[in-house]
Image (spheres, rainbow, N blue to C red):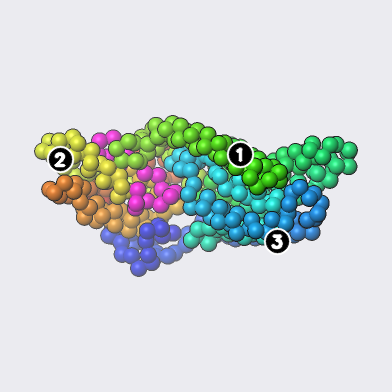
Amino acid sequence: MFHEHEGPGAATTSPGATTWARGELSDHDEAGRTRARRGGRELAAVAAVTWVAALVLYDPVHEAWTSHQHLWLVPLLAVLALAGNRVRARLGRSRSERTVVFDATGAVLIGAALLIPPLLFPVVAIASAWRPDRLRLSLNAAIRTTAMSCGMLSYELATLAAADSGLPVDTVRVIGLLSAGAAYLVTEAVVHVRHLDLADGLGDDLEGLGQELVCRDAPGVALGLLVFALLAVSPVTALLAVPLVWLLVRSLRAQEEVLQSGIDDKTGLLTLQSFRVVAVGELARSRRHARDLIAVMLDLDHMKSVNTLRGHLAGEAVLASIGAVLRSSARAEDVVARFGGDEFCLLLPDTDLEGALVLVERLRLSVGETELLGDGDPLYRTASFGLTRLRVGDDLEALLERADSALRRAKAQGRDRLAVEL
């Protein structure tokens, strides 16, 4: 498949790439598309069933304190959901940062599940999941509509059961809220893990992902339930949640500092240690799904002369510029790291040979055209690249050694070029 940075008319720079038919799908690509379509239909059916159930069982007068008539909140919740989608905490479990995250959209979505009619759930869900990628938009919106519907259903059923048992009204309300929050968290985690492979191919490869999703969303959902309870008393009392939000932001900043220990401070890329942790998972995923995985090593040409002639501060500025070029050129799923000195590595999941050749050529040109120092005395440097593809039986060391061998050959052949070793 083509890399995100390519177009169907892109030309290859390697004669070996001509053996790969442009746009031709391999058997495992076609199988992956078939699984994606089947999983998409399954997810749509689950979302439709739970949403219809919520519509049928929705009772606007069941509990007056829930104030289901807050229709004026719909545009506000949609805006908050969209804002939460655009401005998220950078802490995250992704291929580059595998830690628990805080996702504030859970507060908006659980509030919407309890405050507005189910007919409008998809509006808020789409706003919270909005992105140009239609597949991801549809996937995430369906997952969140399902979770909201299950949260609302759980609240209605739990409060009915608790009320029939003769419990005090306040106790019934608390039971309903806790049930709604738990149902939302569990539903979103289960459905997300079940269908995550549609977008990222990670669903069955990351052990404990469901638990981490619950940990990610639980603080936001708890905050949403608290604001909901305060709003039931009076809109003004909801302002009491502001100090809690402030404390939460402070804790996120502290966690961000912890995360930075896995990021190279000069380039903003992964360190070698962090890269190894992520790369092992990528190799396992590529083997399991029989998907392509490309490794690229690159080294700046004549970097030592920069440190010698202009000093180490200039050298660090050059590294920062190269880091920016690599970050801007990589997809979200690509793994990019600095190995030390002026050596870098890219791991390109789900990218075939032709796509990788096009990407590396563009990256080579981009590095050569980038002004690495802008202090009035411009500095330009080229880079050499070594590329290889995951073979059957490869471990991480074998893959990297082959890419490094190709890199050494590129430098021996005159630098500012790409060498391929398959």
**Residue under circle 3?**
119
Q: In the rendered view of the protein, which quadrant contains the N terminus?
A: bottom left
Indicate which disc, 3 or 1, sits on the residue closer to the N terminus. Answer: 3
| Residue lying farthest to the bottom in this orientation | 9
Q: Is residue 342 above or below residue 86?
A: above
In the depicted structure, whether residue 219 falls above or below residue 137: above
- For the point 15% across and 40% down, which residue is it? 306
SS label for mark 2 = helix
Residues drawn in magenta: 327-344
Where disc 1 sits, the SS reads helix
Tag 3–tag 2 contact (CB < 8 Å) = no
> Which mark is in front, 1 or 2?
1
Nearest to the observer: residue 293 or residue 119: 119
Query: What's the distance in space between the residues labelled 1 and 2, CA to CA?
Result: 56 Å
Does residue 138 show up? yes
Question: In the drawing, what numbered circle is on residue 240?
Answer: 1
Residue 80, horizontal then vertical, whole percent:
56, 52
Q: Amino acid at mark 2?
A: Val
- Residues marked 3 and 1 touching at CB (< 8 Å): no
Q: Amino acid at mark 1?
A: Leu
According to the image, label 2 marks what residue? 306
Sort mark 3 into few (<14), some (14-19) or many (20+) by Cα contacts within 10 Å.
few
Please indicate whether residue 63 sits to the left or right of residue 34 in the image: right
* Relative side of 326 to 276, left or right: left
When asked about the image quadrant of residue 70, the answer is bottom right
Question: For residue 307: magenta?
Answer: no
Q: What is the x, y in percent for residue 89?
A: 48, 43
